[in-house]
Image (cartoon, rainbow, N blue to C red):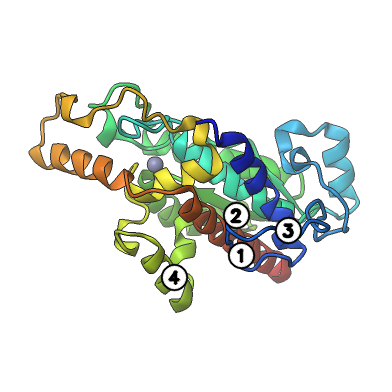
Amino acid sequence: MNTSRPRRDFFFSLASLAAAGSVSRLNASQPLPLPASNMSRAGDRYVDPRKVLLWESTRKEIRERIEGGLLKAAIVPTGSTEQHNEHLAMIQDIASSLLVAQQAALQLYPQVIVTTPVPVGISPYWMERKGTLTLRPETFLAMVYDICDSMRQHGVKTIFIVNGHGGNDQPLKTHMAEFRSKLGINIDACSYWDAYHSSAEIQAEVNQLMAGGIAKVPGHSGEFETSFALAAFPERVHREGVDYEKVHLQLKSADDLKSDRTFYYDSLLATAEKGERLIRIAVDWTAAKVQSMIAQA
Ligand SMILES: [Zn+2]
């Protein structure tokens, strides 16, 4: 897509704008106010987006932030590497949760670090489609737990897991009480689309925004995920050469085949503008959640 660069630049300017209180609601047709575009809420100065990523940091940077009492919480992004119909890349879920985590951490800089993401999830039900990787639930949960435990050992007492793949949602939430008691820290987990049910107003807005209504959120590679991708990483949307009528999937279940088709045709309702608004809601909600967890600690 040749629109990817301006769209992406537009998107990446949003977190800092919103952080500075300049954007309460996206409207792509209105010019954005310029002066606040590179300001962070934390210090009214530009923050390099890599500074909130653990794996881009040096040990010196992390040590100084922890010892100086600046680093108060970590976000652990989880997702999957799995088929996303004919037109989206397999990285979709982990790229989405990482993006939400990073944008939220930027709003709260320097208090929050984003750990290395967990890029493979629990996806056994997509294994009939080539390319999907899946972990056993115990493998996935052990990896998430060990990352949280590593951060605990470094002195981080507040951790929020931001998930981007449906198959991880219940296993994570079911195990939070156990994680909490074993680790002895303030820890919680969400899927980023929980944001869309966070208030009656947000729910009504998302319901109206989506042609298929809120019932289609998150879905799988349909209107929602394709809108997210068009806004955040349009280079990962591949419509070229795709003709769903010529697709011959070898699937055992007729229902599975039917829903695969439905998701594809739903995806044609996606727009970057919808994605921009949906991402903004998820980022603001995640940042508010982490901020309240820090305040409780
Ligand atoms: Zn997905």
Circle 2 SS class: strand
Residue pictured at 36% horizontal, 30% vertical: 239
Q: Amino acid at mark 1?
A: Lys
Q: Amino acid at mark 2?
A: Phe
202 with respect to 266 (left or right): right
The residue where tag 3 is placed is 17
Q: Are marks 1 and 2 in contact (CB under 8 Å)?
A: yes
**Coordinates of residue 259 in the picture (x, y in percent):** 19, 43
Residue 79 in view of the camera: no
Question: Mark 3 against mark 1, which lies toward the viewer?
Answer: 3
The residue where tag 2 is placed is 160
Residue pictured at 59% horizontal, 42% vertical: 7
Circle 1 SS class: helix
Question: Mark 1 against mark 4, which lies toward the viewer?
Answer: 4
Return the disc, 3 or 2, that comes first in the chain's sequence. 3
Circle 4 SS class: helix
Q: Are marks 4 and 2 in contact (CB under 8 Å)?
A: no
Q: Which image quadrant is residue 81 in? A: top left
Return the disc, 4 or 2, that comes first in the chain's sequence. 2
Alpha carbon of mark 1 to alpha carbon of mark 4: how far? 20 Å
Alpha carbon of mark 3 to alpha carbon of mark 1: how far? 19 Å
Alpha carbon of mark 4 to alpha carbon of mark 3: how far? 21 Å
Q: Residues within 10 Å of mark 4 (few under 14, many from 20)?
A: some
Q: Amino acid at mark 4?
A: Glu
Residue pictured at 72% horizontal, 44% vertical: 153
